[in-house]
């Protein structure tokens, strides 16, 4: 039995032994040392709020055209969509020339529902949403409350599916159940697989795990030159176009999946000749499934952020199709052009220090890119840690001039503030809603992820360099903040070791 | 309006409103006792809806949070909260800590009151509020924090100061213009010679809040938000309250000043002098717009979509001062019968005599159907009295409506995704001028 046959995807701390609480260094994690946190995750005795799997799950679901998102939870869950809606609007506009708001609903469970159960309300909500919006699909997303009061969204969906026109996609996002928010990708993919790519919950032509001869969905033909380019919303259109440009120059067809893909056309993913991940943190669950059930092989190793990494990513794809020589020529040409263009920025970047913070793979790949641009990496925070990133840590350990801290933390800006006061980097790259701490310390900052900006491939390397040059040229906004504001931490906290609270749960630092 | 779901809700849960409110209190630090994702969800919501305002001294992803997991769901979360509070007092630098509970610990029955009492009895400046998301929306969470302040933080003061008032009714971040709106009302009250504690402006302090018990009157510039706290303050601190609609522009501000003066027994001479001065300034400033106002034909039919504060307040200003025609007003809050009646009665007798048309609809995609009942779409006949020229004053989610009507549009009520707001506000006489500028600028943007 595969994971896909279960009602919901397993949490990643169990499936991958992923962890979120570790204070180490690049030498520790890069294979020069001996420590790893993969087996024994620590718990902090002091924590700050972060996100849960609901946010990345909604970031994917909200982009699906002709899909309505129906939250089954208390009224606050899912209001993050107010910012994600900007991506829906811009994303729709750059893809189809039409600006349209997403449609998201909530059953808004109240005190009565908490006591009496919310299944009936959910049933009625699904029926009404189906009639009012007439969507192709309705994603029924559960938050914490149904997970505790015992509402069975899968059963509600199963009972109701014959009575409504929309395809119903149950997605489990009970935030308290996993501390690894990357479980979100598995949760959404799980539902897409079970609902849109299977007949009655099982693909009939299964002949065995990973065996050759598996076929696409229900008699559809294999598309021998089509690759699935996986995007769970960590790339904007500009980045999709960069990778599409590179793949197209190898004569390949590109099927971007699953963001902004119409649910009715998602079966195309089962017809592809190859699936290519752009971030192993995102896609292993689904790519394994596509291979096991539909015989679509996959690549899941490199993230095409950075000059070397983009080449490695492209070479792997080319090797699959026997086009190595063509790829080498392409890469040589791209790198020559890019290096010449980057020359004007190198004097500004040379020797400047940088601290990077993001999802694990993105943080590490971006750190390598920054080294390629001439920066010296002096600290990294990865939002979690799992086995897929080992190769990236190894690369960074090999290129590090001296050891530097690695903070495995689901944000936790108090550790970051402590580290930044010690390290005093020239530049900080942080995720959405994650640059304010560094900014208030007067450090030049730049967002490491924004679907309106380019980060990926050769174009992304150049555009990022341009933007960093701009930030470094005048970081007055941050400097003026630092002169006039303070962070909300006590003076004694800055004197304590930055990882004091890791493994402290249960009283160690009382 | 659906009975079974809310479309694109324009508010957070009680915890979200409460966390934003604590962040807005000078020197205060919220401690969430909740699942890990709540704080992040609030940050992303504010990022998209509060006019680009996220957090503050301690908010968004900086907020201490117990991040409870399955372990606590099974075994209870009191211990984890105790540990989190103890470590927060060491790591964070705050003058007041406010523990706020989310859905999960409340359903599993954690006893936060005893945890908070334990720290408070040892001298920590800490209070708590039960703000589980299923208890209500942002506005109720805002009210619960104010209630907690009046219950556990504000000192009892038997002697009242006759010229001192407390002011609230505008929920931080839930009203993206909260700072400016509070300051605008504060300015009016100060012109009357009153000392004002308004909790959240740069002119406020925790000391001022602690001494709020000596105020002679609590002024709530809302017909709904914050009334729980007003009732509680009346019972516990003996302070009467005045609930009055959010005053935008000269007509509403004049009525507001008269109501406050009446309640406080201020001399008519004093209040009339203030009104006369404010009005004189307002109309002198408005005067030079008049030629272009006419030349460009800037009068508009209007649809107003907003929360319980803005729906009525914007409609009053458009009808009574700007001379527009607000043909449909939609309040997007989910409200009970009593609350609906109160808001409807409040719009029944506008100073201009204009007849308001107030509907209650949580699902803004349905606004067009309400409008079409009164203003049918063109039927192809040669002459059609159309709803045009039109303008939609609402949230950024009304852009599609405005587009379908060929109308101008301005985002005022949450969510405001397409404007950067720092301290702009629309209350008071001057606020009416700001709103006039913004409405007309939106019309002539291509000029």
Image (spheres, coloured by chain):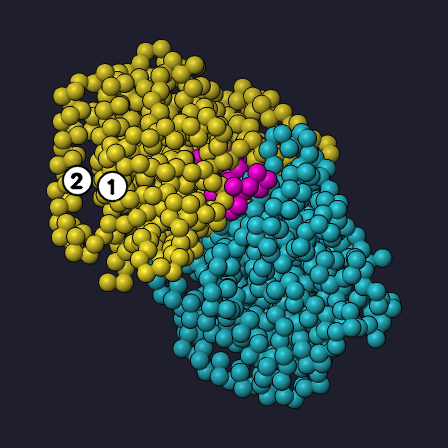
Question: Which element carries disc 2, helix, strand or loop?
Answer: helix
Q: Residues within 10 Å of mark 1 (few under 14, many from 20)?
A: many
In this rendering, position of residue B117 left or right of residue B285: right
In this rendering, position of residue B266 left or right of residue A287: left
Q: Nearer the viewer, residue A373 or A259?
A: A259
Identify the residue at image location x=29%, y=26%: B196
**Quadrant into which the C terminus of chain A falls:** top right
Report if residue B10 lies within the magenta region.
yes
Identify the residue at image location x=14%, y=31%: B276
Q: Nearer the viewer, residue A223 or B378?
A: B378
Write the start and end of the magenta stretch as one range: B1-21
- When the figure is inspected, residue B135 is found, relative to residue B237, above or below; the finding is below
Question: Which element carries disc 1, helix, strand or loop?
Answer: helix
Q: Colour of chain B?
A: yellow
Q: Residue furthest front?
A: B381
Residue A313 locus on image (x, y percent): 63, 75
The answer to whether any part of residue B70 appears in the image is no
Chain of the residue on which disc 2 is drawn: B
Q: Give how far apart the Cα atoms at labels 1 and 2 are.
A: 8 Å
Identify the residue at image location x=77%, y=50%: A7
**Quadrant hosting residue B6:** top right
Residue A187 locus on image (x, y percent): 69, 54
Q: Colour of chain A?
A: cyan
Identify the residue under disc 1.
B432
Identify the residue under disc 2.
B282
Tag of residue B204 = none
């Amino acid at each position: 039995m595969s994971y896909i046959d279960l009602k919901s995807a397993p949490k990643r701390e169990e499936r991958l032994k992923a962890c979120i609480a570790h204070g180490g260094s690049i030498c520790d994690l890069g294979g020069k040392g001996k420590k790893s946190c993969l087996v024994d995750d620590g718990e902090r005795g002091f924590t700050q709020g972060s996100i849960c799997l609901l946010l990345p799950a909604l970031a994917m679901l909200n982009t699906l055209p002709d899909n309505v998102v129906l939250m089954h939870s208390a009224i606050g869950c899912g209001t993050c969509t107010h910012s994600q809606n900007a991506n829906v609007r811009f994303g729709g506009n750059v893809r189809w020339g039409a600006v349209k708001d997403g449609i998201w609903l909530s059953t808004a469970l109240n005190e009565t529902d908490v006591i009496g159960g919310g299944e009936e309300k959910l049933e009625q909500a699904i029926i009404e949403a189906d009639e009012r919006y007439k969507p192709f699909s309705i994603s029924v997303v559960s938050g914490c409350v149904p997970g505790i009061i015992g509402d069975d969204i899968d059963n509600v969906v199963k009972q109701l599916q014959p009575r409504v026109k929309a395809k119903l996609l149950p997605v489990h996002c009970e935030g308290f159940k996993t501390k690894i928010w990357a479980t979100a990708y598995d949760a959404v993919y799980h539902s897409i697989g079970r609902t849109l790519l299977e007949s009655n919950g099982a693909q009939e032509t299964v002949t065995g795990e990973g065996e050759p001869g598996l076929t696409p969905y229900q008699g559809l033909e294999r598309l021998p030159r089509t690759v699935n380019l996986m995007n769970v919303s960590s790339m904007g259109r500009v980045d999709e176009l960069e990778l599409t440009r590179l793949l197209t120059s190898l004569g390949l067809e590109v099927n971007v999946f699953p963001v902004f893909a119409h649910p009715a056309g998602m079966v195309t993913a089962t017809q592809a000749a190859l699936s290519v991940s752009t971030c192993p943190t995102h896609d292993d669950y689904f790519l394994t499934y596509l291979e096991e059930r539909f015989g679509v092989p996959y690549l899941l190793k490199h993230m095409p952020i950075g000059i070397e990494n983009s080449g490695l990513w492209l070479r792997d794809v080319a090797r699959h199709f026997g086009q190595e020589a063509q790829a080498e020529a392409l890469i040589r040409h791209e790198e020559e052009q890019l290096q010449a263009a980057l020359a004007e920025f190198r004097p500004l970047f040379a020797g400047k220090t940088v601290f990077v913070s993001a999802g694990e793979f993105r943080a590490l790949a971006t750190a390598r890119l920054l080294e390629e641009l001439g920066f010296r990496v002096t600290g990294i925070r990865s939002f979690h840690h799992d086995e897929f990133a080992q190769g990236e840590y190894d690369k960074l350990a090999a290129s590090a001039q001296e050891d530097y801290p690695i903070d495995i933390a689901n944000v936790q800006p108090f550790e970051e503030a402590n580290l930044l006061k010690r390290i005093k980097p020239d530049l900080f790259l942080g995720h959405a809603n994650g640059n304010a701490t560094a900014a208030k310390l007067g450090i030049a900052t730049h967002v490491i992820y924004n679907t309106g900006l380019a980060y990926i491939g050769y174009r992304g390397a150049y555009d990022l360099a341009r933007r960093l040059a701009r930030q470094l040229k005048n970081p007055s906004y941050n400097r003026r903040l630092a002169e006039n504001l303070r962070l909300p931490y006590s003076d004694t906290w800055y004197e304590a070791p930055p990882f004091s609270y890791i493994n402290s749960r249960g009283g160690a630092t009382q | 309006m659906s009975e079974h779901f809310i479309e694109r809700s324009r508010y957070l849960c009680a915890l979200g409103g409460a966390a934003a409110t604590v962040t807005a209190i000078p020197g205060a630090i919220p401690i969430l006792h909740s699942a890990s994702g709540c704080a992040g969800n609030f940050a992303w919501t504010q990022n998209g809806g509060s006019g680009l305002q996220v957090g503050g001294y301690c908010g968004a992803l900086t907020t201490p949070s117990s991040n409870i997991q399955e372990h606590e769901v099974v075994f209870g979360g009191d211990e984890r909260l105790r540990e989190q509070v103890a470590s927060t007092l060491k790591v964070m630098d705050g003058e007041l800590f406010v523990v706020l509970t989310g859905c999960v610990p409340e359903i599993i029955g954690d006893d936060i009151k005893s945890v908070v009492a334990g720290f408070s009895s040892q001298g920590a400046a800490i209070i708590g509020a039960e703000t589980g998301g299923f208890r209500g929306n942002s506005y109720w969470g805002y009210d619960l924090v104010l209630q907690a302040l009046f219950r556990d933080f504000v000192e009892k003061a038997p002697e009242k100061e006759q010229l001192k008032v407390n002011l609230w009714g505008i929920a931080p971040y839930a009203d993206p213009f909260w700072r400016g709106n509070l300051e605008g009302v504060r300015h009016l009250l100060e012109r009357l010679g009153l000392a004002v504690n308004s909790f959240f402006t740069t002119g406020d302090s925790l000391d001022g809040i602690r001494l709020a018990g000596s105020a002679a009157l609590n002024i709530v510039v809302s017909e709904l938000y914050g009334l729980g706290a007003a009732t509680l303050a009346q019972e516990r601190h003996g302070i009467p309250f005045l609930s009055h609609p959010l005053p935008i522009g000269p007509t509403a501000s004049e009525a507001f000043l008269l109501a406050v003066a009446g309640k406080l027994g201020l001399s008519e001479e004093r209040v009339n002098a203030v009104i006369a001065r404010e009005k004189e300034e307002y109309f002198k400033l408005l005067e030079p717009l008049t030629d272009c106002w006419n030349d460009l034909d800037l009068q508009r039919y209007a649809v107003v979509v907003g929360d319980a504060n803005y729906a009525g307040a914007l409609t009053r200003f458009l009808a009574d001062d700007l001379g527009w025609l607000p043909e449909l007003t939609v309040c997007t809050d989910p409200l009970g019968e009593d609350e609906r009646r109160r808001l409807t009665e409040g719009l029944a007798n506008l100073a201009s005599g204009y007849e308001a048309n107030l509907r209650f609809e949580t699902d803004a995609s349905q606004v067009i159907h309400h409008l079409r009942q009164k203003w049918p779409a063109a039927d192809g006949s040669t002459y059609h009295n159309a709803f045009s020229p039109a303008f939609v004053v609402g949230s950024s989610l009304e852009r599609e409506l405005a587009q379908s009507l060929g109308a101008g549009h301005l985002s005022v009520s949450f969510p405001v995704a397409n404007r950067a707001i720092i301290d702009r506000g629309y209350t008071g006489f001057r606020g009416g001028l700001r709103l006039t500028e913004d409405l007309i600028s939106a019309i002539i943007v291509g000029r």
